[in-house]
Image (cartoon, coloured by chain):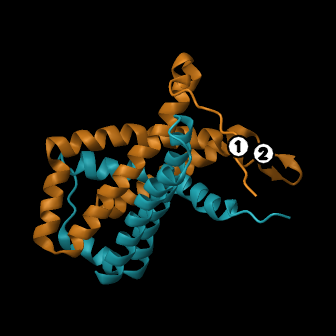
């Protein structure tokens, strides 16, 4: 039995015609930079395991102009991911408290609160 | 009822989205801004101690593996949106690179 499902052709530039779609694509593209930064973290971990000289070399790469530029781009996209992710949580995960729906703003606000606390804890742990 | 593997893909995806949103910006702020500016130092001893600690290992693994999986899943969907197809090639590239990162993290953390 052969099944040949119809696969509709996707127009590659469909998202360019409308601002909302462009914004959507930028949001989705943020995952590429989150992924690339994860790869950088893994590299750092491997260098750390290789010893002091390798770790110091990794720190030098982080502080090189190219390293900083790359990370600043990643930071912009990562922050954009955070903002858009928090914004959609009330839609993806509506909460009810004693039968009453929790206002979307409260859910988003709670996420920003947790974001601030996590960031602060990481900064303190890193020795700021 | 038809069984679906969606929950298995979705849970780490959602967890990864949250972990990425909460922790990646501050990590980039540290490694990409504060360290290059000399406002913060990440000495070898301190980092190695953290990576040796079982809880430190768990945090490091979660901070890398979950966002990596999230990014892979999302990139696969975006590739489909961009008309690059949703086939085996895209799946292999996206999930494959995530698995490389996840396995490399796990192996490094076990060996370190």
The quadrant in which residue B54 appears is bottom left
Front residue of B16 and A83: B16
- Sequence-wise, the earlier of marks 2 and 1 is 1
Q: Chain of mark 2?
A: A
Against A39, is B45 above or below? below
Query: At numbered mark 2, what does the secondary structure look like: helix, strand or loop?
Result: loop
Nearer to me, A120 or B52: B52
Which residue reaches farthest front?
Answer: A1
Q: Give the residue at mark 2.
A: A102
Residue A82: mark = none
**Residue A76 place in picture, x, y as percent:** 38, 37
* Residue A38 x %, y %: 37, 56
Pick the front one: A101 or A16: A16
Q: Which chain is cyan?
A: B
- Report the front residue among A31 and A118: A31
- Which of discs 2 and 1 lies nearer the camera? The answer is 1
Residue B94 in picture, x, y percent from top left: 46, 54
The percent position of residue B70, horizontal first and vertical second, equals: 52, 54
């Amino acid at each position: 039995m052969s099944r040949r499902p119809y696969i509709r052709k996707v127009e590659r530039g469909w998202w360019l015609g409308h601002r909302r779609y462009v914004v959507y694509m930028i949001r989705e593209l943020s995952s590429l930079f989150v992924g690339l930064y994860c790869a950088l973290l893994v590299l750092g971990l491997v260098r750390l395991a290789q010893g002091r000289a390798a770790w110091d070399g990794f720190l030098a790469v982080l502080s090189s102009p190219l390293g900083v530029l790359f990370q600043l781009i990643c930071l912009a996209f990562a922050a954009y991911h955070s903002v858009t992710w928090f914004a959609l949580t009330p839609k993806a995960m509506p909460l009810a408290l004693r039968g009453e729906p929790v206002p979307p703003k409260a859910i988003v606000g709670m996420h920003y609160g947790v974001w601030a606390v996590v960031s602060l804890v990481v900064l303190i742990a890193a020795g700021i | 009822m038809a069984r679906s593997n969606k929950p298995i893909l979705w849970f780490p995806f959602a967890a990864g989205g949250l972990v990425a949103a909460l922790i990646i910006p501050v990590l980039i702020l540290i490694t990409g801004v504060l360290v290059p500016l000399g406002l913060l130092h990440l000495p070898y001893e301190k980092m190695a101690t953290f990576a040796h600690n079982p809880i430190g290992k768990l945090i490091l693994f979660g901070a890398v593996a979950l966002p990596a999986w999230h990014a892979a899943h999302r990139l696969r969907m975006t590739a489909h949106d961009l008309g690059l197809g949703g086939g085996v090639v895209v799946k292999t590239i996206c999930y494959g690179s995530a698995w490389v990162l996840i396995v490399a993290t796990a192996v490094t953390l076990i060996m370190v």
